[in-house]
Structure formats: structure tokens, C-alpha cells
Amino acid sequence: MRKIVIAGNWKMYKTQAEALEFLQGFKSELDNTPDDREIVLCVPFTDLDSLSKTLHGSRIQIGAQNVHWETEGAYTGEIAAPMLTEVGVRYVVVGHSERRQYFGETDETVNLRLKAAQKAGLIPILCVGETKQQRDAGDIESHIFSQLAKGLVDVDQTNLVIAYEPIWAIGTGDTCAPAEANRVIGLIRSKLSNPNVPIQYGGSVKPDNVDEVMAQPEIDGALVGGASLEAKSFARIVNFQ
Ligand code: PGA
């Protein structure tokens, strides 16, 4: 059985006060959430500690949005895995397209971060996906297969989540057709040594399309940006039918 993982990615949104306000509205919506799904909130670094304390003993897991490959060192602006695990973080997003696009993240640094996360006991969520240009040129497979081949060198596939996030669908409202996302995720799975790795879809997942996305046989969860910022909206996504 593959695990279902629904993760919110807050990106650079929410102060601590805003995060705690979100939780007040969100937690009360989870009373009837089926046990079959893991709920994760990937939040800014400054929110991790207070959220982790507030959520202690709840079913909501905390995730970070990046992790460095060294355990400490002269790396201004970075965060190390022991700093995350100390405050109760369980998951970490690695190689998000915004990190690759704006902050020079490469498949090689993604690979280093994945291994460091796993070594510290974190579950990394590896993001892969093609640009509109690559899609139009028919390069989806070659691009994603290359991201996987380079990113997954020496990575333990028993402690991993992958998110297929077509870049043109992120934050645009232009969701990838669920059947197409299902097809690409099936291709991703065919390249893995462990077929039970949960593979999420990400890119404009909303309350009104989540049921169709999650009905696809290959899709094991969602990585949700914009629609995870509002408690009722993310609760509807977590409670997909
Ligand atoms: P979105 O973002 O849901 O706002 O499209 C998804 C993501 O970037 O993980």
C-alpha cells in the first residue's frame, strides 16, 4: 500500500501569529478526516518551532522548505538538518522549482540535500517537473528522467516522497489535466527502484479539483501552495473524497 501524503507548501507566507491563527481554523476541520492520509504543513523556518509545539500529539506533521547538506558551517542563510529535527520537523521540500529557478539549485545540490535530509531522519519531498517550453518541445520525459537520475543517486527510496510539479501549472490556476498528471506520474514510477514511493501532484490544486486529482490511480497525494494558505480551503483538500 502506498501512503497518501497531502502537504501544504506555504512558501514565504505567514508570520508566527498568522500561522497560529490558521491552525485554529484548520484543526477543527479534521475531526472526520480519514486515517489513510498523512497531513503535512511545510512552513517558513520562523514558524517551525511554534507550530511544532502547538501541534505536538496531533496528526499534522511539520515540514521545512529547504535543508543544507552540511550539519553546520559557514553557509550564510542556509539551515542544517539537526536544526530542523531539533524542533520536531519530519518532512522537507527539496528541489522545488522556485529554488531551482531563483536560487540556482541544481540536480547535484538537490541530491546532496536529499541525502543529508535522510541521514538526519527527515523525509524529503523531491520536486520534479517541466517548463511549458519543455512540454511544447516534447521534452517532458527526457527532462524529468534526467532530474530523477541525477537527483536520486544514492538516495534511499524507502524514505522518500516525490512531487510531480509541472512548472507551468504552479501558481497559475492552470492545473495539469488529472489524466495527464497520472500518466507522467506513472512514468516517474517506472524509473524508481521502489514502486511504493508516494508520488504527489502539485500545481494549482484547489478544493474544486482535488477530488478528480486524487481519483487518479497513480497519484498518491498533493503538494499545495496557494490553496494551503487558507484554513477552510486546505481542509477541503485534506478531506478529499
Ligand atoms: P500552487 O503551488 O498550488 O500555488 O500552484 C504548488 C507548489 O508550488 O508547490
Image (cartoon, rainbow, N blue to C red):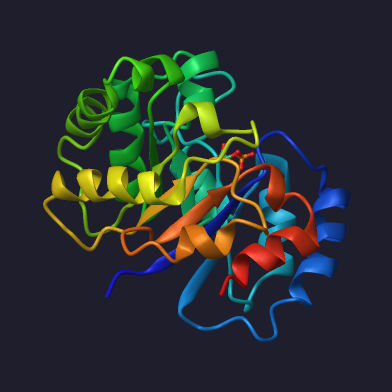
Residue 64 position within the rendered picture, expressed as x and y whole percent measured from the top left: 56, 45
Q: Position of residue 13 (x, y in %)?
A: 76, 38
Q: Residue at x 41, y 47 (%)?
A: 125
What residue sits 65% from the left and 73% below the top? 56
In which image quadrant can residue 61 be found?
A: bottom right
Q: Is residue 19 left or right of residue 68?
A: right
* Figure quadrant of the C terminus: bottom right
Q: Is residue 75 visible?
A: yes
Q: In which image quadrant can residue 197 be found?
A: bottom left
Of 168 and 44, nearer the camera is 168
Q: Position of residue 95 (x, y in %)?
A: 42, 31
Quadrant of the displayed image that contains ligand 1: top right
Q: Along the line of sight, which residue is nearer the eye, 193 or 94?
A: 193
Does residue 40 appear in the picture of this structure? no
Q: Is residue 79 above or below residue 81?
A: above
The quarter of the image holding the N terminus is bottom left
| Left-right relation of 94 to 60 | left
| Residue appearing at x 29%, y 57% in the figure | 159
Query: Residue 52 versus residue 153: which sits nearer the camera?
Result: 153
Q: Residue at x 55, y 65 (%)?
A: 211
Q: Is 162 rendered above or below residue 198?
A: above
Q: Nearer the viewer, residue 142 or 152?
A: 142
Please give left or right for residue 175 compared with residue 31 in the image.
left
Is 47 displayed left or right of 125 in the figure? right
